Structures are given as structure tokens and as C-alpha cells.
Amino acid sequence: MSLTRRQLFQLSTAMPLAAADWPAFHGRDGVGVAEGSKIPATWNADASTGKLAGIKWKSPVPGLGHSSPIIVGNRIYVCSAVRKAAGKAPLSLVVSGAPTAAEDNGEQDWMVLCYDAATGKQLWSKAARSAKPRATRHEKASHANTTLATDGKRLVAFFGSEGLHCYDLNGKLLWTRDLGVINISKYGVGWGYGSSPAIYQNRIALICDDPANPFIAVLSLDDGKELWRVSRKGICERSWGTPYIHASASAVQIVANGWPATVSYDLETGKERWRISGGGDNPIPSPFSANGWIYITNAHGGKAPVWVVKPDAKGDLTPQEGAKPNDGLVWNGNNVGSYISTPVVYGDYIYLGNTNGVVRCLTAKTGEKLYEQRLSADAQIYASVVAADGKVFFPSLDGDVYVVKAGPKYELLAQNHMGEPCFATPAILNNTMFIRTTESLVAIG
């Protein structure tokens, strides 16, 4: 039975998730904000730099994965790829964007892992797939880049070429689907799959932008049956952003970041609602909503826009020089966007982090740039930005988490040591922030 848009919207309040849960990449609705949580400004999770302070626990995570943690109730879930060969998986941390594939093509176990949020104890682990990778990865990526998604009862893991897998919260496999090889590549090098699944009611949205055959698809959460698939040939050459599902009484739409075009699709039919052309040619950040609008950014290749779109927009929204902006576009800013990290709107401002360690603050309603500041000479922001308790958190590849005071003026509150590089986006539950490093899961509080 096909549900109407209004029925889907009304059902959206029926999810069994608690208000505090962090059910997907960048939190509930992809906003990256945990209102009401009290998170400390300072801590030390690196024993080599002094006494540990401000942490509740630190637990090892096997293998390598940039998969961010999600939270359901008192449990944390992450993904990882555990190579069968001896030694650590290779990972480059140098300040370089060279298109180099990692020498990591041996047999792997693609794992789904569950931890107790109070103690850090690993409760269970399941191997979703054991095989050699069907596509290569970039030397800075991993074979488990994507974040799980949950409706509060089921966990969905999507590893691109290594399949779509659905579990219950205790690790029982419910179903699995093979969508074939999805080689997200550039310059002839597979960079690794990076788009996490998005769930709305009994629907799963997936972006599969292999340059040879890019498509977006919606599947049933109940059994993995494919409900529709739309080609993105000529629309997107590659992308790593997670689809954003926006629900209102008038429409339920999927917003897919991309290049040459970012496009919104009707959730039920796959029909295009609106598009914006241009932008950066490596679209990685995920769209999200704030102030009742949809925020989109990307960068690379000389362009770094921020676009803010009204949910009821229709047609081509692409800004044209010298022409009146489309009514569906609230504002757009040039050369202020972010490359890899998804920004956060917190209060009246939008905060963006970049791979060169530069952070920006703009007014969220107009796009006015308030500051642009380099965190440190060593900072590289690949993880997405999160915010809580009047603070904005920027995890970095240099093994530190930079804490900036929320507001229109730049004020660095702390540079906290993790001891290991941070590629994954933190998750926040009540008064604890969970940070996944390259080797550990750490509870800050």
C-alpha cells in the first residue's frame, strides 16, 4: 500500500526512538545538536600527555573504520572493517589530497559492533560480510566509512559494494541485500563508499553514485525490497554525502548532495522536486535542516558554496549572475562552504570546519560571515561538527578535539587530546559525548 505524503508525515511522530537518542549520522535529522546536554569544555583522553581527566571510559575498537557512533537507549553501535592479515590497516594522515589508493585489498570482516554506553563494555559483534573488498579505498578512507541508521527497533548497515544489512538491536540478522559493485571513484582510483543510509518510517534511502552508474534508491525497511530506483547519470558524477529526508505536511523529500547538481526527490515516487547546479566537484557534506530551511554545502575544484533552500521549493534553483534569485532559495554564499565536514547550525549561527583547519562562522539566516579562523597549524577537520552546552566541537586528524565557544566571536575554549586521530563524528547522549577515534571509543563527561 502506498501512503500519502500527509500520512507519512503524521506517522513520523510514531518512531520508538527516545528524544535523547542519536539514531543516525550527525544525530537526529542530521542536525548535530544535543540540546540540554552538559558537556565539559576540557578533558584529556591521552595518557601519554599526562593524567587522564574528564573521561568516563575508553574502549578499544577492532579494525579500521570512519563509521560514526549512533545511540539507542543505553547502547552504542558502530561499524568497522577488520582485516584478516596481521598488522594495522594502512592509513595516511599527511596533509595531502593526492588520489592514492590504499594497499588494503586483502580479506576483511565488515563488523557491526555494540557497546554499553555506561561502561564501554562490548556487548556483541557481528560480521556482516567476510571477503576481499570489491572496490578499493583512498589512503585516508577506510572500508567501513558509513554510519548505521536505526528506527529504534532495527539497525541498518550499508557498506556500498559489500551490501546492505539489517539487524535487530541484539545483533540478529533480519535480511541482507546485494546492490552490486558501487565503486565511488575519481582519477581511476576507488575512494571508498561513504554515504550512510537514511531511514524514514519503513523506508531506507540510499545514494549510490558510482560514476559509471550513479543512482538513488528507496527500499523497504521491513524486508529490503527495492521500491524504486532513479538514475543520476548526468546529474551526479560522484558523491559521499548521506541523503537527508525532510518531512512536512506538503512533502516528504530526499535531498541528495551532488555534482554537477544537488537534487531533491519525492520519497514515494522518486520524482524530482528541485535542483541546484554547480558547487564543488567532491560533494561530501550531508544536507540538514534548521530554521525551517534545508542547508547544503560542498567544496573542491575552486567552489565552496552554501545554499539554503525552502522545503516547498520547486524547479531549478541555480543562482544566475545578475538575475533575481529563485523564490525557493533563501540565501546562498560563495567560497564559505566546507569540503568534507558537515556543518552545524547552533542558535543563530552556522559553524563550518575544513580540512585545512580553518573554521568559519556565518549568520544562519542571512549568510553574513562573522569570522574565519585557523584552529592550529596541525588541525585537519574531516569529522563533522557537533554542538551542545554553548560549545561547538571540532574533532581533528591531529588527535585533538577543538572546543569553540558558541557565538559570533571566535573564542577557543580548549584543545583536548584524544591520543589518536579523529575521523568519525561524535555522538551525544544526555551529558556524555562519545568520540570514536581510529582505535578507540571514548566517553567524555
Image (cartoon, rainbow, N blue to C red):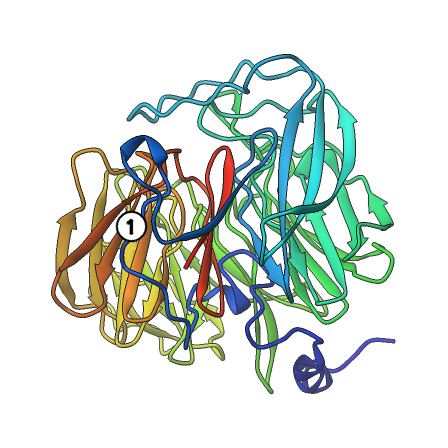
Residue 305 visible in the snapshot:
no
139 relative to 351, above or below: above
Image coordinates of residue 69 in percent, x first then y, are 56, 51
Q: Secondary structure at mark 1?
A: strand
Closer-to-camera residue (31/87)? 87
Image quadrant holding the N terminus, namely: bottom right
Image coordinates of residue 67 in percent, x first then y, are 56, 43
Bin the neighbour count of mark 1 within 10 Å (Cα to Cα): few under 14, some 14-19, many 20 and up. many
In the rendered structure, the answer to whether residue 372 lies left or right of residue 172 reads left
Q: Residue at x 78, y 32 (%)?
A: 129
Q: Which residue is mark 1?
A: 353
Closer-to-camera residue (400/93)? 400
192 relative to 91, above or below: below
In the rendered structure, the answer to whether residue 32 lies left or right of residue 50 reads right
Q: Residue at x 66, y 73 (%)?
A: 17
Image coordinates of residue 117 in percent, x first then y, are 59, 57
